[in-house]
């Protein structure tokens, strides 16, 4: 299956950018230039909502495909086509259900049963270094897309791994040092869905709909504008897109549907709620299904996080419209976009397309879950500390401040003594967001295995962060597996992490992609 033909464009000259250059680029709010000729690929609109049947193939197999990162033009909005970067693909071997067109302009959706071997022959047709990170997958270090394992422009490499983890929603995107933000913003991302028998036995709906949230800013001629004028908040667009479309209306027939929400935005945090106050029924967080569905009046979704939501509009009149909104909240640093972080806006609309019927019973218990305990952690009395901080001295001319993790800025292979960790061992980790001065929330992501949130506590007495926290804290869902956790200003989050069995060099970082690019990332050596 071919989503779009591979291009014939020549990669441009390659220059390794310094962190300084990247920040200059960000500071100038430059429109990204894309050097390839148009190749005439039209966009696929949502066309009123696409609900795919959940196609669980219980027998694991082999998926072999080609994946190419390349410049392209797409019809993102009325008027001129928009220059983007896209993943093109071709299925080489395996069941057709394993690799299907992604939502909007995203890369193909990979959907494989647990146990499947995935072979991805990757080509970099961009004019800068890139690679692929498989976010949420627990795979060997040399297949994970570590920033040091980048692919040169015009280069290729093979990713080859076996998916052996419970069902859930993962995704993939580039992960080169200092360039992840612009590359994801330009369109390089896709969904990676794992299915398994436990999930098939649960009462999760057979129909599903992926909703990928990204914000963008358009300049003259519909060109994408990328930049972070403040240098500290991250890229914020003023147009919020769902699957590449602004405020789409999605038709939903009677019966329950599983929404797979992914926040693939660079730095925008969403506080999601339904317009009529109906609670959101969350059935999955990050890369796994929850043990039991939970209801939330609103749901916080920060960059990198996923949430699976069960929705049944069966009882509603035909053509009734329900809006998914993002409510306002105070993130302290709101950015200088005309749609600030924390602003309220509509995300998408659901419209019933059939006559009312009796809704399905709520999903209830879902899949088996083994809860970790603090007592089971090998360092129970002595958590591994990875504080969020700021570096105003090392590179004072680059970012003011540079956000840091574990007290230092990223280097490709640099390791602090507390960043060598024991494979397959349960530990407690602690991330404090207690910096004085400028503060903002940071979504912290660990590569390798998923973890469980043990506790959230307030560690500063600052009353303004407490007030802001009160407006978001009921939107965290911490009862299942997580690979990215939002740490609010003044907050201490402890997580229980059983380090991966795969030995080697991984990273952990802030998933605000501009923070990551500016050095809010660290290595982890699993031994
Ligand atoms: Cu989605 Cu290291 O990130
Ligand atoms: Cu951050």
Image: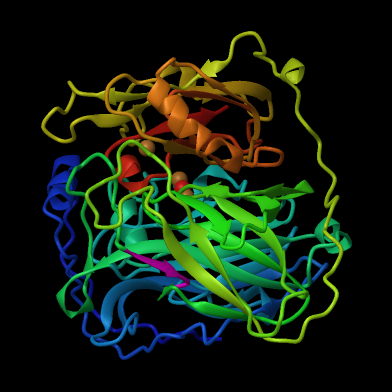
Name the side, left or right, on which 476 lies relative to 173.
right
Count the numbered circles shown: 0
Stretch in magenta: 239-244
Q: Position of residue 235 (x, y in %)?
A: 28, 52
Which residue occupies 15% across, 56% down? 29
The reply to whether residue 364 is visible in this rendering is yes
Which residue occupies 86% across, 59% down? 202
Which residue occupies 28% across, 25% down? 390
Above or below 511: residue 208: below
Ligand 2 visible in quadrant: top left
Q: Nearer the viewer, residue 233 or 374?
A: 233
Residue 357 in which image quadrant: bottom right
Residue 233 covered by magenta stretch? no
Q: Position of residue 2 (x, y in %)?
A: 50, 86
Above or below 178: residue 446: above
Above or below 182: residue 418: above
Name the side, left or right, on which 169 lies relative to 326.
right
């Amino acid at each position: 299956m071919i989503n779009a033909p591979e291009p014939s464009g020549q990669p441009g000259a390659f220059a390794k950018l310094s962190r300084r250059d990247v920040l200059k680029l960000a500071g100038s709010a430059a429109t990204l230039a894309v050097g390839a000729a148009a190749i005439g690929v039209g966009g696929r609109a949502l066309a009123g909502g696409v609900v795919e049947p959940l196609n669980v193939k219980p027998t694991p197999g082999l998926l072999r495909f080609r994946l190419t990162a390349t410049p392209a033009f797409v019809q993102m909005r009325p008027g001129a086509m928009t220059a983007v970067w896209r993943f093109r693909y071709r299925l080489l071997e395996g069941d057709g259900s394993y690799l299907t067109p992604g939502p909007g302009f995203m890369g193909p959706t990979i959907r494989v049963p647990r146990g499947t071997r995935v072979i991805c022959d990757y080509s970099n047709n961009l004019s800068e270094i890139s690679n692929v990170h498989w976010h949420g997958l627990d795979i060997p270090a040399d297949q994970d897309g570590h920033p040091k394992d980048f692919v040169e422009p015009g280069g290729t490499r093979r990713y080859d791994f076996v998916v052996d983890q419970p069902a859930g929603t993962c995704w993939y995107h580039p992960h080169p040092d200092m360039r992840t933000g612009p590359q994801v913003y330009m369109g390089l991302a896709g969904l990676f869905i794992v299915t398994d028998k436990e999930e098939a036995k649960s009462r999760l709906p057979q129909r599903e709909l992926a909703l990928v949230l990204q914000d963008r800013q358009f300049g003259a001629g519909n060109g994408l504008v990328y930049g972070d004028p403040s240098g500290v908040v991250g890229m914020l667009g003023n147009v919020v897109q769902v699957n590449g479309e602004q405020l789409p209306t999605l038709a939903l027939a009677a019966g329950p549907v599983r929404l797979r929400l992914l926040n693939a935005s660079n730095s925008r945090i969403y506080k999601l709620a339904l317009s009529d106050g109906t609670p959101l029924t969350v059935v999955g967080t990050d890369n796994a299904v929850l043990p039991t569905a939970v209801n939330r009046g609103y749901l916080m979704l920060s960059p990198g996080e996923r949430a699976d939501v069960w929705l049944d509009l069966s009882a509603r009149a035909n053509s009734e419209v329900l809006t998914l909104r993002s409510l306002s909240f105070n993130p302290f640093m709101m950015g200088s976009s005309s749609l600030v972080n924390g602003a309220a806006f509509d995300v998408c609309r659901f419209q019933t397309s059939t006559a009312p019927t009796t809704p399905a019973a709520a999903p209830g218990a879902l899949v088996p879950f083994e809860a970790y305990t603090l007592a089971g952690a090998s360092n129970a009395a002595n958590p591994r500390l990875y504080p969020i901080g700021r570096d105003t001295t090392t590179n004072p001319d680059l970012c003011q401040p540079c956000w840091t993790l574990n007290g230092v800025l990223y280097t490709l292979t640099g390791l602090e003594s507390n960043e060598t960790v024991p494979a397959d061992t349960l530990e407690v980790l602690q991330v404090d967001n207690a910096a004085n001065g400028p503060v903002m929330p940071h979504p912290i992501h660990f590569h390798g295995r998923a973890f469980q949130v043990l506790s959230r506590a307030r560690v500063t007495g600052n009353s303004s962060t407490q007030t802001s926290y009160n407006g978001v804290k009921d939107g965290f869902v911490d009862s299942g597996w997580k690979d990215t956790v939002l740490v609010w200003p003044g907050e201490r989050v402890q997580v229980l992490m059983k380090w991966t069995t795969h030995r080697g060099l991984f990273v952990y970082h802030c998933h605000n992609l501009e923070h990551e690019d500016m050095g809010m990332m660290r290595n982890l050596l699993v031994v």
